[in-house]
Image (cartoon, helix red, strand yellow):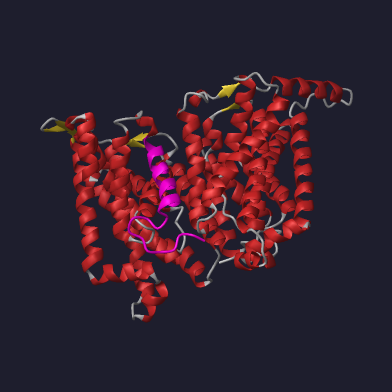
């Protein structure tokens, strides 16, 4: 297989990595079991797509507005559901994500199962320009390279920002909430506000991941945003390590390298069976990590403290 | 509910309302039987079991596999139910009991449950492909009850479902085992000091939850006529809705909640396009969580 194939895998891994950064701030640092991340991603990506194709906006103006829309959705979902017990919160968020997907599938405004196309021309012009320039170094043939660079630069910026936030007093409060909510509240911290901020940041990161996902597949359709995306995100989270932002990149690359690498294993199975087998393996890894090493490969056991 | 039915009859006419109610009672069976297992297991696991929906899938595909060997559908269904019950107990031994003993966090339980859900779903897909597959039953024959119309299969599903709901309810209410199961689901520590053999009861709870899940899946497949390996996961949220509506951990509540969800989804088709049917379950789920988080019969604490 060509280098372009692996660059494509790298793009997918990068999209997941940005997505999982959001899960990490929720699960790893705030103790929120957010299962609605794919829903926030869908809202962000569709908001961007619809602002471009329906309202005629430039994609560069649509992206920041779509991030705000996703954050708004995060606050709207969080405000009532964060008052619930943690397992109920998990169910409320997955129900939210399914409502988003059903709405995108069935509502008249979102293109239904046909989806949305034709929002990415401005990006493709930029990518072509980049490829022309890369051609001078003999790299013009790698069509996936511009998106690959864009995704991982975006990931690096998000990673740096989150690390700064986490080292700040604000980040320490998040951790305190994860470990003992009552104690944090007793110190005068408004727990709900901090949780909302955590959820809002996760929604923004989901939207960003959604932009790259839609630029990669070049169209938007509802099943891209089904809950499996979130569950794979959790697999990446524990693979890389609980409460480790850097680990997210490791987890994402590892998971996708294994998933795509299995293609080269020539087993006497049909394509469908190979596809199913890959997911069975991911499921087994999740069960084993959950039972034996929930802090993940790079995570620290000391971080595994939750408010009861 | 009967009041709602009367109001509906007045608004859309008795024929349409009655037809939707009949269809709703067909769906009520598989929602209620799926939800009662989910709710009983919640008490044991302290986590909503994300793999429960895929137990429905498992039981149904075992049934289809056995029919492929030549057995008729309903005897094969019995094999499917038993297989799912046995699988549930086996999984308890392999996964849940060790996790229970280690007093693990919600995150660990969630990871294991999600992983198991994926293994079951794609394991089924490995053997049966991801394609939509017909159950292979006669879906054309039907019966007329006055002005109402119901497929013979749907009628069978409705009767089996309702009879099993009543049996499950009576069993939970009056048998010693049923009382023990409710006690363990309600409060394991308290059940233990009351002299209940909790390990044995937990095993039997899984057996019952698994068997009922298998039956629920088979009834769903028979009522709809065709399925794919994702179907259990897709109706899992409706099962959550039923369990939470009934007050999570409360077995009667789950049975009642399942009936409400089944009826509500079918009644919604009188006013909205049927493609929105699953969204009705989600809406009930969200509204219950926001307005009545303990459910209609629950006593537990739902807020943090």
Farthest right residue?
A: A136
Q: Residue furthest front?
A: A188
- Residue drawn at point x = 19 percent, y = 42 percent: B156
Residue B191 is situated, as x and y percent measured from the top left of the image, at: 36, 75
B296 is within the stretch colored magenta: yes
Q: How far across and how far down the image is residue B37, in percent? A: 35, 57
**Which corner quadrant of the image does residue B181 belong to?**
bottom left
Rendered location of residue B79, percent (x, y) = 28, 52
Where is residue B97? Give x, y as percent: 46, 68
Query: Viewer-proximal residue, B294 or B86?
Result: B294
Give the answer, above or below, for where B188 lies relative to B77: below
Magenta-drawn segment = B277-304
Q: Does residue A122 appear to the left or right of B233 in the view shown?
A: right
In reply to whether residue A107 is colored magenta, the answer given is no
Residue B232 visible, this orientation: no
Q: Is residue B281 above or below residue A289?
A: above
How many badges with numbers are in the image? 0
- Tell me: residue B234, above or below residue B294: above
- Which quadrant would residue B14 be assigned to in this image? top left
Q: Nearer the viewer, residue A144 or B256?
A: B256
Left or right, A75 with respect to B5, comes to: right
């Amino acid at each position: 297989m060509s280098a372009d194939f692996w660059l494509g895998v790298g793009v997918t891994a990068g999209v997941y990595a940005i997505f999982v950064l959001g899960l990490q701030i929720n699960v790893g640092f705030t103790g929120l079991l957010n299962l609605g991340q794919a829903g926030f991603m869908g809202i962000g990506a569709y908001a961007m797509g619809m602002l471009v194709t329906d309202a005629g906006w430039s994609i560069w103006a649509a992206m920041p507005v779509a991030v705000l829309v996703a954050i708004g959705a995060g606050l709207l979902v969080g405000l009532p559901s964060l008052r619930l017990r943690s397992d109920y919160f998990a169910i409320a968020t997955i129900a939210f994500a399914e409502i988003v997907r059903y709405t995108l599938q069935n509502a008249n405004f979102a293109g239904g199962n046909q989806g949305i196309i034709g929002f990415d021309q401005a990006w493709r012009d930029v990518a072509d320009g980049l490829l022309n320039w890369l051609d001078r170094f003999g790299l013009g043939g790698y069509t996936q390279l511009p998106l690959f660079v864009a995704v991982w630069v975006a990931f690096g910026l998000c990673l740096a920002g989150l690390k700064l936030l986490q080292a700040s007093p604000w980040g320490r409060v998040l951790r305190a909430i994860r470990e003992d909510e009552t104690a944090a509240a007793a110190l005068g911290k408004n727990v709900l506000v901090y949780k909302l901020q955590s959820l809002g940041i996760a929604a923004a990161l989901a939207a960003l991941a959604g932009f790259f996902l839609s630029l990669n597949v070049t169209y938007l359709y509802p099943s891209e945003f089904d809950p499996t995306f979130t569950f794979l995100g959790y697999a990446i989270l524990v693979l890389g390590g609980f409460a480790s932002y850097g680990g997210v990149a490791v987890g994402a690359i590892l998971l996708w390298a294994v998933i795509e690498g299995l293609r080269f294993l020539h087993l006497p199975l049909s394509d469908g069976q190979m596809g199913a087998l890959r997911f069975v393996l991911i499921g087994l890894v999740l069960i084993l990590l959950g039972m034996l090493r929930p802090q993940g490969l790079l995570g620290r056991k000391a971080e595994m403290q939750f408010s009861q | 509910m009967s009041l709602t039915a009367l109001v509906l009859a007045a608004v859309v006419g008795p024929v349409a309302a009655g037809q939707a109610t009949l269809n709703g009672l067909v769906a009520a069976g598989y929602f209620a039987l799926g939800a009662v297992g989910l709710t009983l297991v919640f008490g044991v696991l302290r986590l909503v079991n994300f793999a429960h929906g895929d137990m429905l899938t498992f039981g149904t595909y075992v049934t289809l596999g056995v029919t492929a060997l030549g057995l008729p559908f309903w005897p094969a269904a019995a094999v499917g139910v038993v297989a799912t019950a046995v699988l549930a107990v086996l999984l308890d031994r392999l996964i849940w009991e060790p996790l229970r003993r280690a007093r693990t966090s919600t995150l660990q339980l969630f990871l294991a449950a999600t992983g198991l859900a994926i293994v079951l779903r794609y394991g089924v897909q490995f053997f049966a492909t991801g394609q939509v597959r017909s159950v292979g039953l006669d879906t054309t024959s039907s019966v007329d009850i006055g002005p109402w119309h119901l497929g013979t299969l749907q009628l069978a599903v409705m009767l089996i479902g309702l009879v099993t709901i009543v049996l499950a309810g009576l069993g939970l209410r009056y048998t010693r085992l049923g009382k023990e199961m409710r006690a363990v689901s309600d409060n394991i520590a308290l059940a233990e000091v009351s002299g209940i053999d909790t390990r044995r009861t937990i095993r039997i709870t899984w057996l019952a939850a698994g068997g009922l899940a298998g039956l629920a899946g088979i009834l769903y497949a028979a009522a709809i006529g065709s399925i794919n390996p994702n179907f259990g996961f897709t109706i899992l949220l409706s099962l959550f809705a039923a369990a939470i509506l009934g007050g999570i951990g409360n077995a009667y509540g789950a049975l009642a909640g399942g009936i409400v969800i089944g009826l509500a989804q079918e009644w919604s088709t009188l006013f909205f396009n049927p493609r929105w049917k699953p969204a009705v379950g989600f809406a009930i789920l969200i509204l219950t969580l926001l307005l009545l988080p303990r459910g209609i019969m629950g006593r537990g604490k739902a807020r943090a």
